[in-house]
Amino acid sequence: MVRVPSVDTNLTKLASDNGGEGDCVKVCVRVRPLNDREKSLPNNASRLSVENESHSILVEREPTSRNDPVNSKKYNFDYVADESMSQQELFDQVAKPIAQSCLAGYNASIFAYGQTGAGKTYTIQGESVAGVGVQEKGLMQRCFEEIFSKINGEEKKEDLDGTLSDKTQ
């Protein structure tokens, strides 16, 4: 028999961090680095900047003429990860609390949505670097490792407790 490990996750607090009562849906945005085509665009192309402190993304478009005002829009999210964030950092900030809530008996889901080439597969599955054998693990593998290491730790703890109680009798 496997006991579910105790977890320090307070889902009521998690759900209300964004001010919502019982609102358990969180939206995280991960910004990928610009590709070569995007880097070659003229100066009047849209620019995107990440504001980590305010959990927002600012999209700016330069004016095309003197009469055209600078057009900018700000979008707010529960969490924003810029292009410099590693897979491990993203896991620690976003996915680890979700994996821990599964261990506490709650249903959880992580899914990626976006355009082709936006980085969904890289974020969820990771990437193998050819020739080096190094894998930049994705969120899915890291969640599995987290869950199974906690279960394994509980089994070892349970075995140790059982061994100690047998010797005392």
Image (cartoon, rainbow, N blue to C red):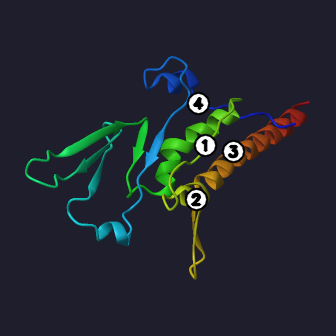
Judging by the rendered image, the residue that carries numbered circle 1 is 110
Q: Nearer the viewer, mark 4 or mark 1?
A: 1
Q: Are marks 1 and 3 in contact (CB under 8 Å)?
A: no
The residues tagged by marks 2 and 3 sit, at their Cα atoms, a distance apart of 21 Å
Which SS class for mark 3?
A: helix
The residues tagged by marks 4 and 2 sit, at their Cα atoms, a distance apart of 30 Å
Q: Residues within 10 Å of mark 2 (few under 14, many from 20)?
A: some
Amino acid carrying mark 4 in the image: Asp
Please tell me which of labels 2 and 3 falls first in the chain. 2
Q: Measuring 26% from the left and 59% from the top, which residue is drawn there?
A: 45
Where's residue 33, x and y in %? 38, 62
Relative to 40, residue 66 above or below: above
Q: Nearer the viewer, mark 4 or mark 2?
A: 2
Judging by the rendered image, the residue that carries numbered circle 3 is 147
The residues tagged by marks 4 and 1 sit, at their Cα atoms, a distance apart of 20 Å
What is the count of numbered marks? Answer: 4
Please tell me which of labels 4 and 1 falls first in the chain. 4
In this view of the protein, which residue sits in the foreground, 125 or 114?
A: 114
The residues tagged by marks 2 and 1 sit, at their Cα atoms, a distance apart of 12 Å
Q: Measuring 67% from the left and 52% from the top, which residue is drawn there?
A: 145
Amino acid carrying mark 2 in the image: Thr
Which SS class for mark 2?
A: helix
Q: Residues within 10 Å of mark 1 (few under 14, many from 20)?
A: few
Amino acid carrying mark 1 in the image: Ile
Amino acid carrying mark 3 in the image: Ile
Q: Residues within 10 Å of mark 3 (few under 14, many from 20)?
A: many
In this view of the protein, which residue sits in the foreground, 166 or 21?
A: 21
User: If the image is split into quadrants, where does the C terminus sit?
Assistant: top right
Q: Which mark is residue 8?
A: 4
Which SS class for mark 1?
A: loop
Q: Nearer the viewer, mark 2 or mark 3?
A: 2
Q: Are marks 2 and 3 in contact (CB under 8 Å)?
A: no
